[in-house]
Image (cartoon, helix red, strand yellow):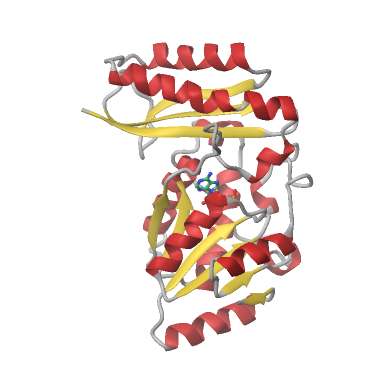
Amino acid sequence: MKVITAIKDMHAEILKQKGLGKTIGFVPTMGFLHEGHLTLLKQARKENDIVVLSIFVNPLQFGPNEDFSTYPRDFERDLALAEAEKVDYVFYPSVEEMYPHKPSVKAVVQERTDVLCGESRPGHFDGVATVLTKLFNIMTPTRAYFGKKDAQQVAVIHGLIADFNFPIELIAVDIVREADGLAKSSRNVNLLPVERQQAAVLYRSLQKAKTAIDLGERNPESLINMIKEMISSESTGQIDYVETLSYPQLKPLEKLESTIIIALAVNFSKVRLIDNFIIQID
Ligand code: AMP
């Protein structure tokens, strides 16, 4: 496994591998790896000749009052985990390497950003689309792997790949959870112990909503209220949003039909957690 910090070196390695006819599987992350990331790496390993992991906490996608400075980092541990997954290259650039000057051009996401995290994190998806445009150009991957935990991100990246004609196959991977159902996240370590216990209610509330749908509930408001009440009564978290939308279009729904997402975000004292499920309704 090679660790590369310079863009030109990374690009040269990729060109070499592509010259040999190798397929490239790319897994972009912000590091502090957990089983969610490892699942993406495992799938990339199965489906490609070469696996590239990037670790970059992208300042462009954090708002001024968000957790860029407290975002957990442990590069040595990440390297050991990457090695165990038989990653070929770890791309670990500095902020200066990725943004040597204030970007003169950036990507602006114009659809699907007026809802969910786009609404409460203005500019977040522009930052994601900008860094991915750079990373896609550096890696020219055959396939890129993303988790459905960030379902809005997956929808936005579909748009980025289609609209900018990146010849990349997007692979969306199921959410990996802790034993109590909490979606794995690098941010979970910044929950207070009592909040960590409470946080499982996010998943339980989504499960309850799923059961209600299975039993015939089709009213978005009833489901949203059920989820909100459950989270408020069983945790100290402050609800940022609970929404039901069409997926992947992310349009509001009057009635639950065809493919929908139920997504939520909850602020705890130092961490904002997200979770969702996507369901096909007949
Ligand atoms: P991050 O490092 O948080 O930017 O995540 C990097 C990638 O891992 C993104 O595509 C995430 O959606 C994905 N990911 C993060 N957590 C999970 C999880 N619990 N299950 C599946 N994928 C995940």
Q: How many marks?
A: 0
The spot of residue 196 in percent (x, y) is 67, 30
Name the residue furthest right. Answer: 69
The image quarter containing residue 215 is top left
Residue 156 appears in the picture as rendered: yes
The spot of residue 35 in percent (x, y) is 55, 51
Name the residue furthest front. Answer: 179
Q: Nearer the viewer, residue 23 or 190?
A: 190
Quarter of the figure that contains the N terminus: bottom right
The spot of residue 103 in percent (x, y) is 67, 60
The spot of residue 271 in percent (x, y) is 70, 34
Q: Nearer the viewer, residue 86 or 47?
A: 86
- Residue at image coords 74%, 54%: 73
- Residue at image coords 40%, 76%: 23
Residue 107 appears in the picture as rendered: no
Quarter of the figure that contains the C terminus: top left
Q: Nearer the viewer, residue 160 or 233?
A: 233
The image quarter containing residue 99 is bottom right
- Residue at image coords 75%, 30%: 192
Work out whether 274 lies above or below 59: above
Work out whether 17 lies above or below 152: below
- Residue at image coords 49%, 65%: 26
